[in-house]
Image (cartoon, rainbow, N blue to C red):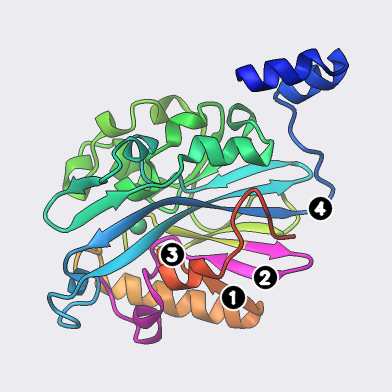
Amino acid sequence: MSLKLRALCASLAVFACTAHAADTNPAVSSLRLYVFDCGTIDVSDISLFSPGVDKGQKKTLTDSCYLVAHPKGTLVWDAGLPDEVAKEKAGVKRGQSFHLRMNKTLAQQFKETGFSPESVTYLGLSHMHFDHIGNVGLFPKATLLMQAEEYEAAFGPDSAKYGNDPKNYPTLSANPVTKLAGDHDVFGDGSVVIKRAIGHTPGHQTLFVKLPKTGNVLLSGDLVHFSKNWENRRVPSFNVDKELSLKAMEEQAQFMKANKATLWIQHDLEQNAKIRHAPKYYE
Ligand SMILES: [Zn+2]
């Protein structure tokens, strides 16, 4: 508790402060979606994501992660860049292509929602790339919901082949896990559904959320990284399977059409600038 809060507590009735300090999750009567800003990625040559197009041009991507609160439990979708990035004001270089920055940690943003990370029921990761798993350690008790192939790529003997290293996510193997082999209805009522959409990685997945007031949305994972690539169906050079990537894009497009869903592209800076962020939420 901060000194300021302590002083405030001293001047208030004790029970009010006790309630404030406790890790009590807000009561949720209908579905909510919170959006977090989980970092910024400056890309030195965006043609890495769209081979042969815009060669040598820079582009900035955002990195989004989410909390879905359902009356039956909570699901975190993707865990962003590591919160440690926020300590470096000038950001952190990663390899030849990326420069990473972060304004506010996920831990802090999560706190502002009133939900406790320790109490999160499910952890859904679109895939195992570094910019989606940075803070998995915040959710040690959550049941991991992952396609079996992605779990194998993370922890199996060929993890290095996929650019994965279990040393980079030391807590994750201790999380309870449900390995998936297709779509998965998280709370059993069709309102939150993990969609199998492989190709970017061996077990990539997206998340369909049926919001009663906002409408239906599909959180992209890395099905696509920005609008122009979606419109032109472009596949990044580093996807594990180009044909499967194109197939997944087409299937998800059909699914969205049939379900009147809007695609929220997790890395699209311009689109996310228009989306309300936590502690506000969508219903
Ligand atoms: Zn990504």
The quadrant of the rendered image in which ligand 1 is seen is bottom left
Q: CA separation, marks 3 and 1?
A: 16 Å
Within 10 Å of the Cα at label 4, are there few (<14), some (14-19), or many (20+) other Cα atoms?
few
Quadrant housing residue 209 = bottom right
**Residue drawn at (58%, 66%) of the image:** 275
User: Is mark 3 in CB contact (under 8 Å) with mark 4?
Assistant: no
Camera-nearest residue between 239 and 155: 239
Label 2 sits on what residue type? Answer: Asn
Q: CA separation, marks 2 and 3?
A: 18 Å
Image position of 45 (left or right of 249): left
Mark 3 lies within 8 Å of ligand 1 (Cβ measured)? no
**Residue 134 placement (x, y as % from top left):** 37, 40
Label 4 sits on what residue type? Answer: Ser
User: Is mark 2 in CB contact (under 8 Å) with mark 1?
Assistant: yes
Question: Magenta span covers which residues?
Answer: 209-236
Within 10 Å of the Cα at label 3, are there few (<14), some (14-19), or many (20+) other Cα atoms?
many
User: Is mark 2 in CB contact (under 8 Å) with mark 3?
Assistant: no
Pointer 2: what residue? 216
Indicate whether residue 280 is drawn in magenta. no
**In the rendered structure, which disc, 2 or 3, sits on the residue that comes first in sequence?**
3
Label 1 sits on what residue type? Answer: Thr
Q: Look at the numbered disc 4 and give the secondary structure of its residue.
A: loop
**In the rendered structure, which disc, 3 or 1, sits on the residue that comes first in sequence?**
3
Pointer 3: what residue? 197
User: Is mark 1 in CB contact (under 8 Å) with mark 4?
Assistant: no
Mark 2 lies within 8 Å of ligand 1 (Cβ measured)? no
**Does 160 sit above or below residue 25?**
below
Q: CA separation, marks 2 and 1?
A: 6 Å
**Does 241 sit above or below residue 88?**
below
**In the rendered structure, which disc, 1 or 4, sits on the residue that comes first in sequence?**
4
